[in-house]
Image: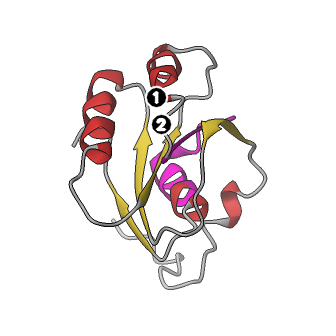
Amino acid sequence: MIDQNTDFFAYVDNFATIEGIELIKVFGYEYSSVEYTIAIPTYKRTEYLKEAIDSALNQDCSFAYNVIVVDNNPERGDETEKMMASYKNTKNLSYYKNAKNLGMAGNFNRLFLLAKTKWVVMLHDDD
């Protein structure tokens, strides 16, 4: 049943809902001269995330790019954070954790706010 009192076309700033929520930069390198970012949202899927990151980092291309991972699990020292430690010295990879679970769409929005490049592609952690 459709709610007759809801204005489905009303403007809602979904980025504002995550504005005040702390973001923890665990590690990372940012290169301002690149035009492309591969943005990977994750939440408790370590085995798939490793495959996605390895795939992103092993692209055979003629241009530089950044990879950003944002973990929506606020728990510190979890399995994902331990696995991500093996990538700590990877020059074009940044890893962040939300201090609070933002929900799926909120985490997606966080990625797009972090990406400072002209082009952004989202690669889900289980792809």
The colour style of the image is secondary structure
Q: Residues within 10 Å of mark 2 (few under 14, many from 20)?
A: few
| Residue for point 68% across, 59% down | 17
| Residue for point 46% across, 77% down | 4
Query: Which quarter of the picture shows residue 24?
Result: top right
Q: Amino acid at mark 1?
A: Tyr
Depth check: give the residue in front, 90 or 15.
90
Q: Are marks 1 and 2 in contact (CB under 8 Å)?
A: yes
Residue that lies at the very extreme toward the right in this rendered image: 20
| Residue for point 48% across, 36% down | 90
Instruction: Name the residue that disc number 2 marks.
Output: 90
Instruction: Give SS at disc 1.
Output: helix
Q: Please indicate, yes or no, whether residue 18 appears anywhere in the rendered image.
A: yes
Query: Which quarter of the picture shows residue 19?
Result: bottom right
Task: Give, as a single range, the part of the protein colored magenta.
Answer: 92-110
Q: Residues within 10 Å of mark 1 (few under 14, many from 20)?
A: some
Where's residue 86, x and y in %? 46, 21
Q: Give me the C-alpha separation between circle 1 and circle 2.
A: 5 Å
Where's residue 99, x and y in %? 69, 34
